[in-house]
Structure formats: structure tokens, C-alpha cells
Image: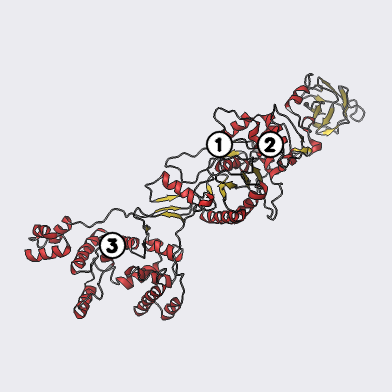
Amino acid sequence: MKTSLKRVLRLLGYGAAGGSALAGVSAGGFLALDRAFPPPLPASLTVSTEVVDRDGQLLRAFATPEGRWRFAVDLDAVDRSFVDMLIAYEDKRFWDHDGVDVIALGRAAVQFAGNGRIVSGGSTLSMQLARLMEPRENRTIGAKLRQIFRAVQIEQRLSKREILERYLTLAPYGGNLEGVRAASLAYFGKEPRRLTVSEAALLVALPQLPERRRPDRNPEGARKARDRVLARMVTAGRLDAAEAARAATEEFVAARRPLPALAAHTTATALANQPFASRLQLTIDRRAQEGLEAVARDAATKLGPKLSVALVVADARSGEILGAVGSADYFDSGRSGWIDMTRAVRSPGSTLKPFIYGLAMEEGLVAQETMIEDRPADFSGYRPRNFDMSYQGDVTVRQALQLSLNVPAIRLLDAVGPARLTARFRQAGVTLKLPPGEAPGLAIGLGGVGVSLRDLVQLYTGLANRGRAVGLRDGSEPAGTATAPAAAVLSADAAWQVADVLSGVTPPEGAARRSIAYKTGTSYGYRDAWSVGYDGRTVIGVWVGRADAGAVPGLSGYASAAPILFEAFAKSGLAAVPLPPAPAGVRKPTRDELPVTMERFAPLEERVAAAPSEPAPRIVFPPEGARVDLGAAGAEATPLVLKLQGGRAPFRWLANGRPLSDPVRRRTATWQPDGAGQSTLTVIDAAGRAASVRVFVE
């Protein structure tokens, strides 16, 4: 007894010492052996780190430390017909045995005796899993006995489902591919959730001789192995002969596809921030990401060498980034593709102008139809000039923003104050980059400041979200990172006015008109071209330029970046959402409806010099809330006398919003009521100041 156990243990590879220690074991021998030599079953397998999109679809994977592609397998995510075919081909009594198929082993022994060599191993899937966990180079009796022992141990520790999942994770499929998911992605370009009969048969055949049957190295060998599996399935009654014949005619691509590598910059950041995670989920939408990367590649090809493209797509309400392209090609060294240009700080050109106009509208300095000068101006030594070096003269505020005129924007920034504008940006979670110790000046309105594409998109979420900007996030942040709450960058009224103006900007040449508002920008020296647009839900930002900040003659936001913006909206696959309607009570006054003070914007010094010295007008008769009885004298014959104090002549009187007459210089007027009821009387002086009272006529 002792001698035989020693021989078995030596065959199993445990040496003479182990054999002597266990030689006297009889009925409890296996349990003792099991405790002494437990199977190498780690709680979890080392697998490739997966980065998935918001719906769980694979964006990118990273190889294991030893350079293998090995993905965790969930049996529910594998085609059931493939699993059935695998069991029928490899281990038809898998669900019934305890790790060893005695019938299959007997057949293998008979074949060995008749041929003098191993013809078939009679291995179960449990035994094959044992071999994968403890690889042995030689096919010997000792190796087979070791597999049998390990298979029984495995069956006692794992369920049948777990055994299948581990096998399908570790099975070799050629080269550095391990597991059915890696093979399906590399050979078919898809997850193994839905496989054709031909694909399933090939994946069943590959693990037996993976290097000889690789479809990318030996397509004919792969085809023959697949056909043998199909024939076996027909013989076993698992497959109809006609269906097998059709599957045998199906061609497969004799090449190995690259594994998904979408959102390369974002996925790399996610892995760097959470290096020990085996699965990372981002907010990115895979379909949108694929569309954006195609847009960036095509655009960069047309733009020429060394130029790159970056895009960011965000949900304006939640702040979730739905797509991010850091460069046109991550692996293109000529374009410095490894640099994530969505995070690089660059000059934003004119893309901050909408916020200048919005703040001026919010403070009541201008309306869309207010006239403003576009002429050479000097702001204490700062002399801004327009992009085309020409001037338009008098234009409306709407025209000035749509044409992106520089001088009007600086006039308004001088009025609202650069510090107030940057304070709004900080409130919205974005801090502009200025030289150390330098205060914000008027130059920030034309791009004299640093900002990233991500931060610019974050600011624009405020324009799309009724004035409230939301912090952006994509899931790559370190664990526990808090999301910045929504904060006001403009009032809801001002944000709508800006959107109304920007929605009227002419689309770039060749682009179809879309229901979006957008703005372009070009930095000084033709180094950066920008375009940012939004609808009622989505904001897309585009940057074009060289990663090394080199000048690119002819580069401009309108000609270079805007066409990419419109293409990105078309190819992102995201549903279009109309721009939000005007908030309750907000309207766009015509020029004739503007108060005197808003008909033309005047510089601060002119407004101060023209400020009236007289007190504001005040209606002294009738007083507020007066009840006027005109019946005794006859309402037809006796008008009501109106009197005021203060104000600057001439004066315009209105009753219920309708003018009573042309402006008058006297401080008295008369009003003939239309009838009984409440009415509102208003007077406006030459300085645009107004006073009102409500009266009730009986």
C-alpha cells in the first residue's frame, strides 16, 4: 500500500517526501491529500482592466501585467448555443460527472493501448481547467493523474457554472489571447453574446491547437477545424445538416482585429486615478464617442499634418460628458496625439464674448436692438481692433455679437467690469488662467486669458441650462471626488437673450442649418480655432490647432472649427432638443419699444456726464390708489388733470401703456378715461426715468 501511494505521488509530482508522509492513508487518504496539496484556485483571476461606457459597453481594455488579453466571463453574457456546442464537443457528460468522465478515460486508455500513443486524452472541462491553472509541458501519465486529482478538487470547490466561467476566461485562443471574450473581440469584432453557428464552431475548435488553428495565421487550418466541429455536432444530433452546411460556407476575416481603444485619453486617466480597479465605468456614450472620433480623424486629415482636433460633448443638465476626443489620433506622434487637448490651457479667442453681452443685458445696459459703436477706440492705452481690421460703424448689439466685433465687446466689458465677469466664471466652477499676480483686464474679452476646452464647455452649459452652469464629470475622476453643484453664470433672462442671438448666426459654408446656438473664436496669431454650440440639452465644444501652440496661417474658428461642430452634432447620434423657450414674462423688445436710455449704448464716462441733476419725475396728481369720480361733471366733457414734479423735459405720458400725445415740456397734462375701472398712468422723462400710479375711475 505504501509503495503504491508513493508511486502515485511521484507521478503526481509531489516527490518522495510527500509520498512517505501519506503512504499509510486508506479511506481518508484523499481528504488528507486534498488538505496537504490544495488546488491553486485564487478567489479571482487576474484579468484585463476594462473601461466601459454608461451602458456597460466596452470602450477600452488594458492588457494584464504579463501582456495578455484576458477578460472576465459571465456565462449569461455568452451565446448559449456556443456553450452547448462546447460541452457537446469537449465534455458531453459535463453536467453529470464529478470532475472525471470514467467512460471517456476508458476509451482513451483503449486507444493508447492499441496505438502505443495518446490519441485522445479523455479530459473533462474540469481537467482542462486544472491544466490551465497548472500548465505541464509533457503529456505523461503522471500529468494526467495530476489533472484528475485537481479536477476532483475543483469540482468540490466550484459550481459547474463557475468552472465553465473560469475555463472560458483562461482557454488559449492564439497569441496572447485568452478566453472566449478576447477571442470573439479579436477575431469577430464583437462580444460573444450573439455568435453565428460558424463563429461558435471556430471558438470551440481553437483551444485544442490554438497556434495551428489561428485564423489570422492559418485560415485554412482554422476552417478545417471549424468544419470538424460542425460535422461532430451533426453526428451528435445537435445541429441540422443543412444548417451545418450553410455555416461551413460562411467566410471569416483572416485577420486579427485591434481590441477597442475608444476615448483613449479619458480611459488612460481613469486607470491612472483608479489603478487597482478591474472594471471602470464612464459617463461616455459609446455610439457618440465612435461618431466623434470619426469626425476628428476625417477633419484632421483634411486640415493637414501636425494639426489636431479635440471635442467635448456634455449633457447641459447633468454635466455628464457623453464624448471626449483628446486628439485626432492618440498614436499619431506627428500630431502629438498623446496630449489631451481637452484639458490643455489655451487662449479662447472670442468664445467668452457671449457672457460679456449676457452680463450687460442682465444689468440692463443694453438690449438686442440697442445701437452700439464699432469704431476705433482707446481704453487707457488698450486699442482693440476687429479680426478683419475693418469697422462697421453703428450696429445693433445683436449684430455686434453675431459678427463677433471686438470693439463693441470691449465697450461692454469696460462697462460691466472684467473682475465681475471672472467672478461669475469662478462661481460657475471655472477659474481663468492669468499670469501670476495679474488682475483680469479688458484683454480677456478677446482671448487674453487661458482656459481649457472642458472648462469652456462647462461655462456654456450655463447658456443652455437657463443660466446655471453644471460641473462636468466623466467617471475618470478619483474615487470619492465630489461633483460641483450647479451655479448661476447668468440670469435666466440674459441666457435666453444670448441664445436667441447666437441661434441666428449663419452656419458655416456647406453645413446644414440646425436648431443650435453657437459661437466661434480664433486666438491671437492663428494658434487656436474654437467653436462651441448647444441646443436644449447638449453642448459640444471643438478645438483645432497644433499641440505645440505653433501658428497656423489661415486658421479660424468660423472656417476651421465651426464645420466640425456641425458635423459633430450630426454624427454624435444624440437626439436633438429644441432650445428652451423664453422664461415667463421675458420678451425681445423692438427698437421702437426701447426706453430712451437703451436706444444707444454710451461709454461709462458719457453716461456719467449725461446723468440728470434733477430729481426723478414723480406724479403728484392723481395720487397712488386714488378713486376718481368724474360722473357728476360728465366723463365726456371733463378730462382728468395730471400733474408731476421733478424730471427732465420733455415728458411722455402713457395710460395703460398707450401714449396720450406727443412729448410735452409742461408738467401738466390731461387724460380722458375710456370708462370706469382701474388704470395705470405713467410718465417718462428725457433721461428715461419713469414714474407710475394706479387709479380707479368711478
Which quadrant of the view contains residue 204?
Answer: bottom left
- How many other residues sit within 10 Å of disc 2, few (<14), some (14-19) or many (≥20)? many
* Element assignment for label 2: helix
For the point 77% across and 29% down, which residue is it? 597
Q: Is residue 284 left or right of residue 349?
A: left
Q: Residue furthest right?
A: 637
- How many other residues sit within 10 Å of disc 3, few (<14), some (14-19) or many (≥20)? some
Residue 509: mark in rendering: none
Numbered disc in front, either 2 or 3? 3
* Element assignment for label 1: loop
Residue 574 drawn above or below residue 689: below
| Nearer to me, 522 or 526 | 526
Q: Which residue is mark 3?
A: 132
Q: Which residue is mark 2?
A: 357
Q: Is residue 542 visible?
A: no
Q: Are marks 1 and 3 in contact (CB under 8 Å)?
A: no
Q: Is residue 309 left or right of residue 74?
A: right
Residue 455 drawn above or below residue 149: above
Q: Position of residue 525 (x, y in %)?
A: 64, 41
Residue type beneath disc 1: Val
Q: Which residue is mark 1?
A: 430
- How many other residues sit within 10 Å of disc 1, few (<14), some (14-19) or many (≥20)? many
Residue type beneath disc 3: Leu
Q: Position of residue 606 (x, y in %)?
A: 76, 25
For the point 37% across and 63% down, which residue is it? 175
* Separation of marks 2 and 3 at Cα, in angstroms: 68 Å
Q: Position of residue 132 (x, y in %)?
A: 28, 62
> Which mark sits nearer the N-terminus, 1 or 3?
3
| Nearer to me, 290 or 654 | 290
